[in-house]
Amino acid sequence: MASSSVTKNSRLLNPWALAVVAVAVGGLLWTTFQREEVFQPDGREPDAVSANYAELLLSAHPDDDHLRIQLVDLLIRLGEYTKARQHLEAWPKPQPETQAYYRIELDSLVAAKSNDLIAQQALMERLNSFDHRKLPVPLLQKLAKLALTLQAPAFAAGVYEEIADRDPALHNESLEAAAQWYMAAEQPGRAAQIYLQLRRDSQEAAERRKYAQLAFNGLLSAGQGDGAAQVLSDELPLLNNPQTDAAWLEQGVDVAVANKRFALAQRVLNQWQVLQPDNPHIALKAFHVRLAIGDLAGAWETGQQLVVDHPDDQALLEQMAHLGEWQAITRWHWGTGFNCWRSKKTRRLANTRGIWRVSSSTLIDQFRCWATSCTSACSPMSSLMR
């Protein structure tokens, strides 16, 4: 009986000691698992153990919104979508926009995993009606990526614009992303306006030129050729690099002519000539510019050398033939044409108002003959014409 009495009265710890131990252990857990190491243990990727620790911590502090969001993110990274949703829906006092975002993210992940196209389409509609303006910047960045996953580039572009407005450190980077995705969404006009804004804000010449050309291309894609021509006009004095600027100048000539900016077309030609004085394409481009502005005499003068340099260019020969007809160039040219007509035994006679007219095909032969220096065939008749 004595032994049972001793056993009955002996305890390892009394209740007060147990309470002290419990508080100490709880405090130790709280101190330990408050740190980010819960979510990134020893710098490694988080694992299921990390998630268990975080859940234990959240159960002790259910009103800690930051901890709850970290846990939801962790569970999403681990593919534990059901658990993540449980913690999201158990939020005592939720932030409505943040909770709505995570609902969309979880739904999209589940839909993608199951290849549910109908659910993905419904998610796109939810996304377009989602007011994201109150989300913090980190969630906006995630939302933009989510929108791209759901193939909603225009929505993603709008989110990137919001980020640019909110965070000065991410301003240029986010605006570039916005412009890129507006282009992908077939909204080049909006992209061009963003590039113009970046160009205005840029302090570096190389960046300014890059944004100017991107704006130029966007305006062209949007059918705003006159705006593109103006961008080129504003940038023209700075286009002085033969390696990087010549191609843009060549394109710019065509854009200026197409938008009836003939003075600009001539300025661009002149700048191109400065950069590449030996480029044979410049003379051909100048020929077409003179035709476009109605300078037929100038086109004829330029074309004479061109047919020598390009004797087999059929389109050029036809254009020069028409110039010969329209301008009735000089007696010498008509004589040379007549001689070539005779040497090839082809002619077309038209008796209109008492004058001879030579057809375009005959004049093509004239210029081909002249360009290849067929003096032996031409000289007898030329002497008669003189």
Image (cartoon, rainbow, N blue to C red):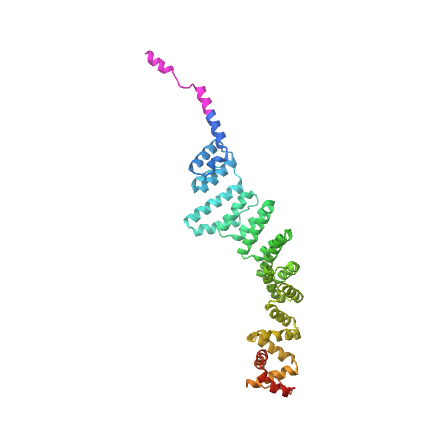
Q: Residue 46 occupies which quadrant of the picture?
A: top left
* Residue 12 within the magenta-colored segment of the rendering: yes
Q: Residue furthest front?
A: 376
**140 left or right of 384 in image:** left
**Can the viewer see residue 355 in this picture?**
no
**Can the viewer see residue 333 in this picture?**
yes
User: Magenta residues, as a range?
Assistant: 1-22
Towards the viewer: 257 or 93: 257
Horizontal and vertical percent position of residue 281: 59, 68
Horizontal and vertical percent position of residue 207: 61, 53
Horizontal and vertical percent position of residue 347: 57, 85
Q: Identify which residue is drawn at 60% across, 58% down.
A: 213
* Residue 312 within the magenta-colored segment of the rendering: no
Residue 249 against residue 375 in the figure, above or below: above
Towards the viewer: 133 or 162: 162
Residue 242 against residue 363 in the figure, above or below: above
Q: Residue furthest top?
A: 2
Q: Identify which residue is drawn at 61% across, 83% down.
A: 336
> How many marks can you see?
0
For the N terminus, the quadrant is: top left
Residue 29 against residue 2 in the figure, above or below: below
Towards the viewer: 86 or 236: 236
